[in-house]
Amino acid sequence: MIYNSRSIIQMMCTGSIRYGGGALEDTVSLIPIGDRHLGEPRPKTTVASLREKKQHHEPITCLTAYDYASARLVDEAGIDIVLVGDSLAMTMLGYENTLSVTMEEMLHHTRAVRRGVKHALLVADMPFGSYHATADEAVRNASRFVKEAGAEGVKIEGGEKRVDLIRRIIDAEIPVAGHIGLTPQSVNVMGGYKVQGKSLAGIEQLMRDAVALDRAAVACIYLEGIPREVAGMITAEVSTPTIGIGAGLDCDGQVLVLHDILNLTFATPAKFVRRYGDAAALISDAVQAFRTDVASRQYPSEGESYHLPKETQAALDTLLARKRSMRR
Ligand code: KIV
């Protein structure tokens, strides 16, 4: 009889081999438990604490995150708002733009992020089509982000023309973040991703949008792709905190897409993106090194392998020897 792994497993299951167990070495996955944030206890970011930051001229920080690990790292780094942006359509799912991402996909990622965020305010983007048909449907979809995925607020693109709908959602006890300027869900109407508010009429519309959102009591207003001067005027005019992306230094806070700052987008970055790390190089180098190690049998080492306890090995040797002698 030839002893392949199947027959050995059978022998173990029938009790003809006893194996030890319970040692730490047998624990395949060691999930770290506990908070790695070792500094002062950190207060939870709330809609009210964002307003306080604006009042005290303390810059607000926001980054996107789309999964548990990145959400946890962003949160533990002390970022105020974690945004599950619909930019995940491109960064995580490889779509061409944000228009294709669905409610179910956004909910799936928001749930994962929820499990990684303890202190930051968790805001989820309402995807294209989820708030455009009726206000009832918009409220239902916004509620799903809170109820099913643990979001603490939702973000909606558009100013004046979305204000009635935004009030309905706020009436349903759901904080709303506004988003005006270059709103990527309007790409087909804008005819591309173009800086907004460069003409007097454009500036006037942006001011009306911002004031309308301010009066509706949104939690914050994202200002995307507008001249610094216009973002500064809006920020001075409204009591709602403004969070800029490509909107210059005079906003109350700044947001960037995590994949942009980490060089994980496979695209030429926009002018406002600052790269803080090169995760693409890090991942490529690690993957290449793994490939080389496996191909040259340098991985796994003895230290990276599990071994039978001595007594099990002895019992196995005896058993195999007995089987061999029976074959003769
Ligand atoms: O989807 C997103 O990441 C965003 C931010 C860029 C504001 O909307």
Image: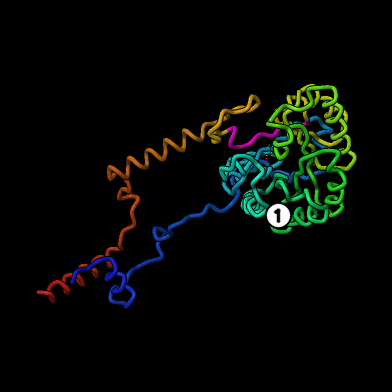
Q: Front-most of 249 and 53?
A: 249
Q: Position of residue 236 (x, y in %)?
A: 86, 27
Q: Position of residue 221 (x, y in %)?
A: 79, 37
Question: Coloring scheme of the render?
Answer: rainbow
**How many numbered badges does the structure rendering display?**
1
Q: Front-most of 170 and 77?
A: 170
Image quadrant occupied by the C terminus: bottom left
Q: Position of residue 312 (x, y in %)?
A: 28, 67
Which span is picked out in magenta? 252-261
Left or right: 22 in relation to 242: left
Q: Front-most of 238 and 18?
A: 238
Residue at far left of view: 328
Q: Is residue 124 visible?
A: no
Q: Is residue 106 above or below residue 56?
A: below
Residue 60, image quadrant: top right
Residue 294, image quadrant: top left
Q: Which residue is mark 1?
A: 150
Residue 42, image quadrant: top right
Q: Is residue 223 above or below residue 155?
A: above
Q: Position of residue 98 (x, y in %)?
A: 65, 42
Instruction: Name the residue rendered at 62%, 50% in the picture.
Output: 109
Q: Is residue 257 magenta?
A: yes
The amino acid marked with disc number 1 is Gly
Residue density around tag 1, few if under 14, some if 14–19, many if 20 or more, within 10 Å? many
Ligand 1 occupies quarter? top right
